[in-house]
Amino acid sequence: MLNIMEVHETNQMIEQEKLDVRTITMGISLLDCASDDVDVTCENIYRKITTYAKDLVSTGQAIENDYGIPIVNKRITVTPISLVGASSCKTSEDFVKIAHALDKAAKEVGVDLIGGYSALVSKAMTPAEELLIRSLPQALSETDIVCSSVNVGSTKTGIDMNAVELLGHIIKDIAERTADNDSYGCVKFVAFCNVPDDNPFMAGGFHGVTEGDAVINVGVSGPGVVSRALDAAKGKDFEFLCETIKRTAFKITRVGQLVAQEASRRLGIPFGIIDLSLAPTPAVGDSVGEVLEKIGLEQVGAPGTTAALAMLNDQVKKGGIMASSYVGGLSGAFIPVSEDKNMIDAAASGCLTIEKLEAMTCVCSVGLDMIAIPGDTSAATISGLIADEAAIGMVNQKTTAVRVIPVVGKGVGEMANFGGLMGYAPIMPVNQTSCEAFVTRGGRIPAPIHSFKN
């Protein structure tokens, strides 16, 4: 039972500290939509999504009004489309038809984004999976709210370097096709290692094959709440600091749990997980970078940044797990450059580099996220970035990812603007020393020895 002090505290977090529920995401299985005819598959997909999710947006708005808790996005995830379209799609253009069906259905029900135009190729690509990957430039440039991901590696299987090499060229092509909008198409694509089945955040969200027919997942935010709480920890030792973060994460997660259970009840769809990631926005005071600086760094990227982030990530998870038995997704602290005001400033000043960000990804959620790089960066270099992050995830048994945007026509020091929650970012320098002979070898990097745990 909540007491009146807890009610006041939650109201303060919402009104003054930018606490929000970042997303209610409905996951929908499309496995039963598959057929031998791509047009029938598209019709089945459209019908199922518009049936299951018809009340998702209105329900989210009603919960906002009833509880006063901002819910920023309403989203949908679906079964990886490479599986759904395997029987009916004989060409890349066939898969693009499905992308249009997803876009149309998502717009019909009014959600902000739909994820799951995806393929899982951590060991090798089937012909259908390769077709979907090759369709990405056309699919992401011709649709508005469809998001895509490709899982190229895992701790159990190793890294599919054929897929990694191909994705370097695909990302370049996506950038070229959306060059008139700062290569925005790349914002809607992410390459993963050890991707989770229940991630409610985009662009990497999809409805895993381990899930049921439909599920409600919720992603919470709250770096502003943590930042404000750390004002009381100034000058205190690490024990006090950790307890402060942990208690704050507990409170944030309880808000998310309330929203998730209420959405589940009203929609008649099972509750899945709470993703308690600290998800920043470009707004002042809603920054993971600010949290790290309040821990004691002059600016993000300074020596000690990785240690501070490791501690923050761990305490967020500990507090969240105490608050809910169903923590999942990614959960921890996100470090997307373009979506975080203090990260943007650190990147612009040169204090935060891609190499430092890579080190930080060893200890936090996800990986190299929302990083704008020069448009003339080679496909091989992009593949090398993906391979490096996949190796970190594979060896450390964690999720890692790469979402980089080679902004066509722009170079280091210029600014790319993606709008809304996606924010803006300075073009960051990338080591251009060639790795082409490495990424073009072909085949698979084998799984590490600790993967053999059967």
Image (tube, grey):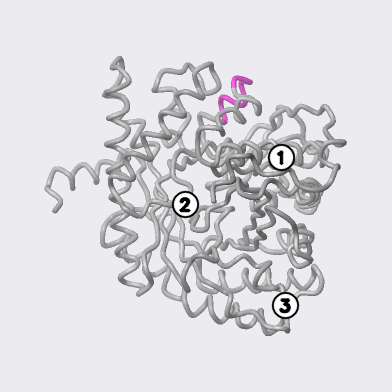
Q: What is the C-alpha distance between the residues marked 2 and 3?
A: 29 Å
> Is residue 209 a member of the stretch shown in magenta?
no
Disc ID at residue 329: 2
Q: Which residue is mark 1?
A: 387
Mark 3: secondary structure: loop
Residue at left offset 83%, top offset 36%: 438
Disc ID at residue 87: 3
Q: Residue 108: percent from the left, percent from the top?
A: 54, 74
Q: Is residue 245 left or right of residue 354?
A: left
Extent of the magenta region: 344-351
Residue at left offset 37%, top offset 48%: 20
Q: Amino acid at mark 3?
A: Ser
Position of 103 relative to 273 (above/below) = below
Position of 1 relative to 355 (above/below) = below
Viewer-proximal residue, 240 or 9? Answer: 240
Q: Residue 121: percent from the left, percent from the top?
A: 69, 56
| Crowdedness near tag 3: few (<14), some (14–19) or many (≥20) residues, C-alpha within 10 Å | some
| Crowdedness near tag 1: few (<14), some (14–19) or many (≥20) residues, C-alpha within 10 Å | many
Position of 90 relative to 415 (above/below) = below
Q: Residue 377: percent from the left, percent from the top?
A: 80, 36
Residue at left offset 36%, top offset 31%: 227
> Which mark is first along the chain, 1 or 2?
2
Q: Amino acid at mark 2?
A: Gly
| Crowdedness near tag 2: few (<14), some (14–19) or many (≥20) residues, C-alpha within 10 Å | many
Mark 1: secondary structure: helix
Position of 252 relative to 81 (above/below) = above
